[in-house]
Image: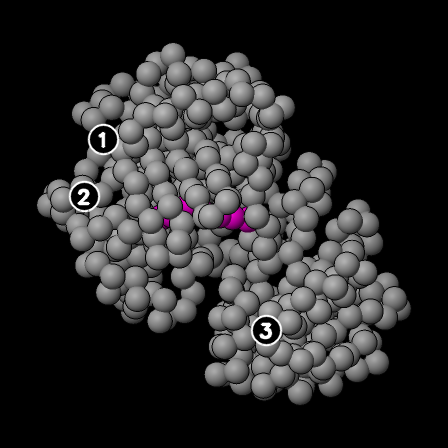
């Protein structure tokens, strides 16, 4: 076991990424690596998806990130017991040498590479890691309970930074590393091919650390986990392993991410009631299906202003061209214009708060779902309303984050997201 403490902080005000002893599945002890991985916890939203992952392999990582029990305390204790058992039985095992991990995802022509490591946590005022979305306290409390019980970072956040695009520093190490045989390679059922390498050479670790020390990062995925890291660090006397959190850092100058929308499901609002409340304030048009055609109509409308696609009750309706008077009355004026004109801002400040009067942080009223087809299917099944969104451009997200302006919660979905279960970080070491 490595008993040396973590490296001291760098002299820079930028990112400080250090190696750790990654905990990984032992391939001989599981059916396949693909069968034990999972999407991030907040993407596994449907019970059928959860059950599918649980049945894929008895050791699927979902049993750690989303344990099933009646109470939160019981769920967290179950996850902690499961992690301890898998470690003692050799299902999971820590690597012998602390490392940074080069991680590659490929989907057809789309290639993404980055570095997984333990990132020193920084205060929001330091502007090293930039959030761009608000968070929900109950989700932070849920994730904090799980992390406390397991004493582990079970899945990495996705952070992005932008280099000059040159093949130097971190990029140079990545490109040298991917020429070597990987630690693991697998293809998950969504068609993504994943490969993972370890970087243990002191010179290469120093090269990465020195390069990243000159950058700040944008949280692409994992705002609630980042907020949870900060909460848990505040509970511990520093220095401790809680001063660091597990992240994947991707240079979007080299590997641009995809940006998708996160949709809303309004459980208790039938489509006819939703449409009736919008009459006179939005232009409403019924759009013929299928879903792909309706989403194209949404994209066309969103190019000219705020637009939303309402689905359920066997139909699609496009709501666009909101009343300027309604927007002036309901949108806060103390934010930049780019924020005031976001679809997510209009949805939360105008539609949810003033028109439909639906609390945005009440799970019994609203769900946030990444997949459009799943959102529509659940609205059809339950009699609610699916509100489908068009994605915002990454430049807008980054510009607002640099101004210190956060977008409404669940405004964007950056990807591809790292698969959960390829490498974990335990804090007991």
Q: Quadrant of residue 41?
A: bottom left
- Residue 27's tag is 2
Specify the color scheme: one colour
Is most of the magenta stretch helix, strand or loop? Answer: loop
Q: Residue at x 41, y 69 (%)?
A: 46
- Residue 291's tag is 3
Do labels 2 and 1 touch, CB within 8 Å?
A: no
Label 3, label 1: how many angstroms apart (C-alpha)? 46 Å
Q: From where the camera sits, is residue 75 visible? A: no
Residue found farthest to the top = 203
Residue found farthest to the left = 89
Q: Residue at x 52, y 82 (%)?
A: 380
Label 2 vs 3, first from the N-terminus: 2
Q: Secondary structure at mark 2?
A: helix
- Give residue 185's position: percent from left, percent from top: 30, 41
User: In the figure, 345 relative to 206: above or below?
Assistant: below
Please tell me how crowded label 1 is: few (under 14), some (14-19), or many (20+) other residues with Cα within 10 Å. some
Please tell me how crowded label 3 is: few (under 14), some (14-19), or many (20+) other residues with Cα within 10 Å. some
- Residue extent of the magenta highlight: 414-420
Q: Residue at x 51, y 48 (%)?
A: 415
């Amino acid at each position: 076991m490595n008993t040396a403490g973590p490296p001291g902080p760098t002299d820079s005000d930028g990112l400080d990424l250090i190696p750790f002893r990654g905990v990984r599945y032992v391939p001989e002890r599981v059916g396949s690596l693909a069968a034990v991985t999972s999407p991030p916890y907040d993407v596994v939203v449907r019970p059928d998806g959860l059950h599918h992952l649980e049945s894929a392999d008895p050791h699927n990582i979902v049993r750690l990130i989303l344990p099933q029990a009646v109470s939160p305390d019981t769920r967290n204790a179950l996850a902690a017991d499961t992690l301890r058992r898998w470690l003692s039985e050799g299902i999971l095992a820590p690597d012998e040498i602390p490392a940074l991990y080069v991680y590659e995802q490929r989907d057809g022509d789309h290639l993404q590479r980055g570095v997984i490591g333990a990132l020193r946590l920084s205060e929001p005022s330091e502007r090293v890691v930039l959030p761009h979305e608000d968070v929900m306290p109950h989700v932070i409390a849920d994730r904090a309970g799980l992390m406390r019980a397991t004493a582990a970072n079970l899945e990495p956040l996705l952070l992005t930074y932008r280099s000059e695009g040159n093949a130097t520093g971190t990029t140079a190490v990545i490109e040298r590393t991917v020429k070597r045989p990987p630690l693991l390679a697998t293809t998950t059922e969504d068609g993504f091919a994943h490969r993972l390498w370890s970087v243990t050479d002191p010179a290469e670790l120093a090269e990465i650390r020195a390069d990243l020390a000159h950058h700040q990062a944008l949280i692409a995925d994992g705002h609630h986990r980042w907020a949870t890291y900060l909460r848990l660090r505040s509970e511990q006397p520093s220095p401790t392993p809680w001063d660091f959190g597990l992240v994947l850092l991707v240079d979007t100058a080299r590997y641009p991410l995809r940006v998708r929308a996160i949709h809303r499901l309004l459980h208790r609002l039938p489509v006819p009631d939703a449409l009736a409340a919008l009459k006179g304030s939005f232009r409403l048009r019924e759009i013929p299906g299928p879903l792909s055609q309706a989403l194209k109509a949404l994209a066309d409308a969103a190019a000219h202003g705020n637009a939303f696609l309402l689905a359920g009750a066997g139909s699609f309706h496009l709501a666009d061209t909101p009343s300027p008077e309604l927007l002036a009355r309901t949108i806060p004026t103390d934010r930049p214009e780019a924020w005031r004109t976001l679809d997510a801002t209009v949805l939360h400040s105008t539609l949810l708060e003033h028109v439909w009067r639906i609390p945005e942080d009440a799970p019994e009223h609203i769900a946030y779902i990444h997949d459009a087809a799943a959102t529509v299917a659940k609205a059809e099944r339950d009699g609610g309303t699916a509100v489908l969104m068009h994605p915002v451009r990454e430049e807008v997200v980054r510009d607002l984050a640099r101004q210190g302006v956060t977008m409404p919660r669940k405004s964007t979905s950056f990807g591809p997201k790292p698969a959960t279960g390829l490498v974990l970080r335990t804090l007991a070491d």
